Image (cartoon, grey):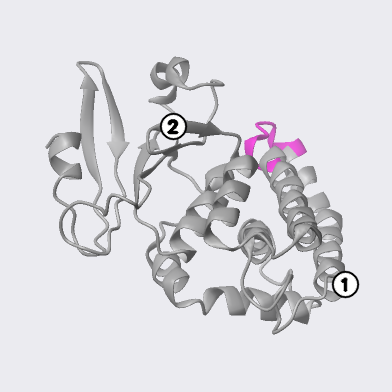
Amino acid sequence: MSVHTYLNSYLYHETIYIRVPQDQNHQLTVIQLRTPVYGHPPHNMPAYKLTYFTVRGRGELIRLALETAGKSYEEVKVTFADWPALKPNMPTGQLPVLEVDGKQLVQSLAIARYLGKEFGMAGECSMEQCLVDQVIDTGADGLTAYVKWYFEKDEEKKAELKKELVETTIPKFAQMFTTFLENSGGKNGFFVGSKLTLADLACHEAFTDFLQLNADALNDFPKLAANRQKVEENETLKQYLAKRPESVI
């Protein structure tokens, strides 16, 4: 089944994965595509295409934004084995890459912020945008610490890194997020404003990682636990989270 054929036969909110040959020796895993209607997307609806690895990682905040907004998007899921052949074709030699109507965008947080503004999830004014951004950037710092543990090959050092994460790093981030939640003027249990923003999604994603190392990480942080529950109660996002493949990272 070709990409061209697939993209011209949209289905109602179906998730389909296929493998599309790129050349004789290489394959890429394609596609997650969700569309609200049968047929072609409306001409005024941007066409989104996300290229990223088969993990959550630095692509997940982008996915969460798209899913929360109920947007249709094509996804090219790249395995680590496939990546070397694809890497030279990427603008910075890195992933994720989001194409919007064919225009390639890079840098995960820049992409997430762009989508946040497009979908009304970035804050209502410059101050709110900064309050959202500080949570996003703190979440990215948390991922950096988590990734350091995940990719460590020396088992003894990896055990030390895990101990540090569980005993020191994760509680530190939980306290920082709690401070943001308490001091950013959010309402209804949200970080900023009275509705869900990228800040809530970023914190949720950070603790999706952290909770895998310590399932009790939020026990002493009830406000964060309540915020996490509010994110998971979002009707459009709930469907995605229920179907999302398990991923350690």
Q: Position of residue 119 (x, y in %)?
A: 53, 60
Residue 103 against residue 132 in the figure, above or below: above
Q: Magenta includes 88?
A: no
Judge by depth and name the residue closer to the eye, 158 or 137: 137
What's under tag 1, amino acid-wise?
Answer: Asn
Q: Earlier in the sequence, mark 1 or mark 2?
A: 2
- The residue labelled by disc 2 is 103
Q: Is residue 98 left or right of residue 142?
A: left
Q: Residue furthest bottom?
A: 188
Residue segment shown in magenta: 149-157
Q: Magenta includes 151?
A: yes
Q: Is residue 180 left or right of residue 204?
A: right
Q: Position of residue 95 (x, y in %)?
A: 52, 32
Q: Position of residue 21 (x, y in %)?
A: 20, 26
Question: Which quadrant of the figure has residue 79?
Answer: top left
Judge by depth and name the residue closer to the eye, 191 or 85: 191
Q: Main secondary structure of the magenta part?
A: helix
Give the secondary structure at mark 2.
strand
Q: Confirm whether residue 194 shows in the render.
A: yes
The residue at the point 74 percent across, 68 percent down is 217
- The residue labelled by disc 1 is 183
Q: Is residue 167 left or right of residue 116?
A: right
Q: Position of residue 146 (x, y in %)?
A: 70, 46
The residue at the point 35 percent across, 45 percent down is 47
Q: Residue furthest front?
A: 44
The residue at the point 76 percent across, 37 percent down is 157
What's under tag 2, amino acid-wise?
Answer: Lys
The residue at the point 48 percent across, 45 percent down is 55
- The span from disc 1 to disc 2 (Cα, nearest Å) is 38 Å
Residue 52: mark in rendering: none
